[in-house]
Image (tube, helix red, strand yellow):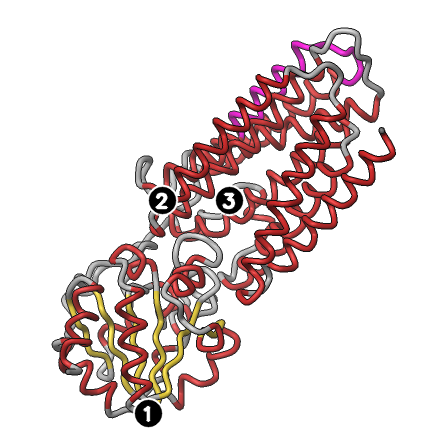
Amino acid sequence: MQNFASLLYLVASVLFILALKGLSSPDSARRGNLYGVIGMVLAVVTTLLLMDKPIVALMLGAVVIGGGIGATLARRVQMTQMPELVAAMHSLVGLAAVLIAIAAIFHHGQEHTGAQKIELFIGAFIGAITFTASVIAYGKLSGRFGAKPVSFGGQHLLNLVLALAMLGFGFTYYATDNHAAFLMMSAIALALGVLLIIPIGGADMPVVVSMLNSYSGWAAAGIGFTLNNSVLIIAGACVGSSGAILSYIMCKAMNRSIISVLLGGFGAETAAGPAADSGPKNYKSGSPEDALFMMKNADSVVIVPGYGLAVARAQHALQELAELLQEEGVNVRYAIHPVAGRMPGHMNVLLAEAEVPYEHVLEMEEINNDFSSTDVVLVIGANDVVNPAAKNDPSSPIFGMPILEAHKARTVMVVKRSMAAGYAGLDNDLFYMDKTMMVFGDAKKVVEDMVKSFH
């Protein structure tokens, strides 16, 4: 039976790897999800078969309840709520790792080797940090805790002291098998999760969500070693490594150090906020009809979507507008910044929901060189990712962050509710350029007015 179970675990592990491979491209994402679902069902069934006198009703009840909650959330969740939902899911993975570790050390009649104690320690403290950090990230993304960074004097010193205390209690548990020391270590890790995330501003949450994804994977892998569960080790390692790679890519996209993310100092550079107001600035505004006229008479149009597009749920109307422009002979493409929206891939999923052809959606590196030869750029719901201050203002908190260079286009049109600052709290010089026209209003309403003007 054990050999057969090992074979099934191997098959499940291969399916998880194929799932990650499939999710690397929009064309194969559905297939990748299917591989992941089949792999998880196979892993759960195999684990149940291996259990000694399992309480089947209890296990199946938990699966039904959890599956029902997941299915309900999947149907009801709005695209604007996806980032906080992902953060909430990470918190549950971290909590599961902590609870499994605690159950393992209190399991009567089970002795743990030195290596297993280390694995329990690693899985528990990473899981505890992931749990509370994800809860804070959820609160910031949903607006319940506020997006502004929270800092105080001696914050990093306090984090260091707590980290050393956590390691000290972990060593005590390793040396003496003291259960109270393990619980103290877990409690300190829970506190660290809060303290590491509160100094991070809401605008930096996409990288935080990606890093927490990585943490949850490593927590699962650590517990997998203790349970001698190969599929948990492999799945956790895949999630942990892919999340770490994505976090590194996103840090490069925001000109940040991944070390500062790991140490919880990721929001410090932007905590100062925008520079002092130098007085009112002049800008030009126009109507949706004016914007449509300019796009219809252009040879090329690049659309830059942002979180405001998701809030307004304007993606379907926007794609209808793009199709009408293409029928007029206009070359229409979409430009995606790596951290647009509130989580990695947020805009890609949003556009896929509106059935935007994959070949029309280009990443920043693919399209930045084309802006200088683009007739019109339509910025809709985006702000910080097109702010020229990142290129030309050394005093700006976002200076050095790679941006979509929309300011190089011949004409820029920005759909926005008002002239209020973006999520990072910074004014945007793009809005005041002579080539820029502001179109004020709800994104969906504005785009729908453009579509109506076509007929």
Disc nearest the viewer among 3 and 1: 1
The residue sitting at 77% across, 40% down in the picture is: 8
Any part of residue 275 in sight: no
Horizontal placement of 372 versus 41: left or right? left
- Residue 454 found in image quarter: bottom left
Which callout, 3 or 2, points at the residue further toward the start of the chain?
2
- Residue 30 found in image quarter: bottom right
User: Could you say where residue 132 lies in the image, as x and y percent from the top left?
Assistant: 49, 30
Secondary structure under badge 2? Answer: loop
Which callout, 2 or 1, points at the residue further toward the start of the chain?
2
Which span is picked out in magenta? Answer: 174-192
Count of numbered badges drawn on the protein: 3
The quarter in which the N terminus is drawn is top right
Disc nearest the viewer among 3 and 2: 2
| Label 3 – label 2 distance at C-alpha | 31 Å
As drawn, 217 above or below 168:
below
As drawn, 54 above or below 409:
above
Secondary structure under badge 3? Answer: loop
The residue sitting at 19% across, 73% down in the picture is: 438
Q: According to the image, label 2 marks what residue?
A: 77
User: Could you say where residue 282 lies in the image, as x and y percent from the top left?
Assistant: 15, 74
| Label 3 – label 1 distance at C-alpha | 49 Å
Q: Amino acid at mark 1?
A: Gly
| Label 2 – label 1 distance at C-alpha | 37 Å
User: Could you say where residue 336 lies in the image, as x and y percent from the top left?
Assistant: 43, 69
Q: Amino acid at mark 2?
A: Val
Q: According to the image, label 1 marks what residue?
A: 329
Horizontal placement of 455 versus 95: left or right? left
Q: Residues within 10 Å of mark 3 (few under 14, many from 20)?
A: many
Q: Amino acid at mark 3?
A: Gly
> Is 186 part of what is drawn in magenta?
yes
